[in-house]
């Protein structure tokens, strides 16, 4: 089975809808140890993308690139450049490819993570979205090497994303506004890790819908 790059609209709209449905949840999490605007900013970016796409078809990589540009240039806070970079690097890693194989998807996720590492100092354990994304990259790359069935791998990635998100609850924030709280940042999820979990799970759901 494979994901056709041309079938990107279904995947991207699943991501858009997931962020829109969880904007309050993300704002509530961010409000506990941050400034509370994460859900609003993310929703603004994703909804802007959906409005501009309209009813048009789009490739997965083209859509990721367009979404990334909007997030990079048009939403506030640190998360715009962060997610913009991730999505644009993912798109570049598969540009021109018709089939998104599981191996290629692993390369896309890996490129997104490497792009992120190029603009932030955060690494696993620092209570950021890295704690959600990094284990998912490792999992998908491993699943491809093991020749796992595509749908099984996507289901496994969703579990991995959830575990990564939950792991941030017991961490001390090292970056961002929450880092000022030190030990008091423990016991609360990181908002970026939560949004990354929502995005990756929605991406997987959308990919499952178009698997052929």
Image: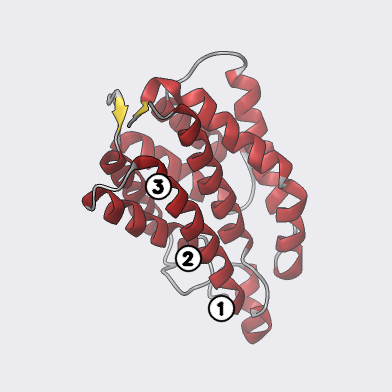
Q: Residues within 10 Å of mark 1 (few under 14, many from 20)?
A: many
N-term-proximal mark, 3 vs 1: 3
- What's the residue at 56%, 42% (across, down)? 202
Residue tagged 2:
131
Residue tagged 1:
171
N-term-proximal mark, 2 vs 3: 2
In the image, which disc is placed on residue 105?
A: none
- What's the residue at 40%, 54% (across, down)? 116
Image height of 81 relative to 95, above or below: below
Residue 35 seen in render: no
Separation of residues labelled 2 and 3 (CA atoms): 22 Å
Tag nearer the camera, 3 or 1: 3
Which element carries disc 1, helix, strand or loop? loop
Q: What is the x, y in percent for residue 76?
A: 64, 46
The front one of 200 and 102 is 102
| In this picture, residue 79 sits left or right of residue 130 | right
Image height of 177 relative to 153, above or below: below
- What's the residue at 65%, 42% (across, down)? 19
Residue 1 seen in render: yes
Whether tag 1 and tag 2 are in contact, CB under 8 A, the answer is: yes
| In this picture, residue 113 sits left or right of residue 192 | left
Q: Residue furthest top?
A: 56
Tag nearer the camera, 2 or 3: 3
Q: What is the x, y in percent for residue 97?
A: 27, 26
Residue tagged 3:
152
């Amino acid at each position: 089975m494979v994901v056709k790059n041309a079938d990107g609209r279904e995947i991207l709209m699943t991501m858009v809808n997931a962020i829109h449905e969880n904007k309050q949840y993300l704002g509530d999490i961010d409000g506990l140890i941050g400034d509370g605007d994460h859900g609003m900013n993310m929703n603004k970016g994703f909804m802007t993308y959906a409005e501009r796409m309209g009813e048009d078809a789009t490739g997965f990589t083209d859509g990721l690139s367009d979404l990334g540009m909007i997030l990079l240039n048009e939403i506030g806070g640190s998360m715009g450049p962060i997610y913009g970079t991730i999505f644009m690097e993912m798109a570049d890693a598969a540009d021109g490819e018709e089939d998104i194989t599981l191996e290629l998807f692993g390369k896309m996720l890996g490129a997104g993570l490497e792009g992120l590492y190029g603009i932030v100092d955060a690494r696993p354990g620092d209570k950021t979205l890295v704690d959600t994304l990094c284990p998912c990259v490792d999992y998908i790359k491993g699943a491809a090497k093991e020749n796992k069935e595509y749908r099984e791998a996507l289901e496994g990635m969703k579990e991995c994303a959830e575990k990564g998100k939950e792991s941030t609850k017991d961490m001390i924030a090292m970056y961002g506004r929450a880092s000022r709280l030190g030990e008091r940042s423990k016991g609360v999820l990181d908002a970026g890790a939560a949004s990354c979990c929502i995005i990756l799970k929605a991406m997987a759901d959308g990919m499952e819908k178009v698997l052929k």
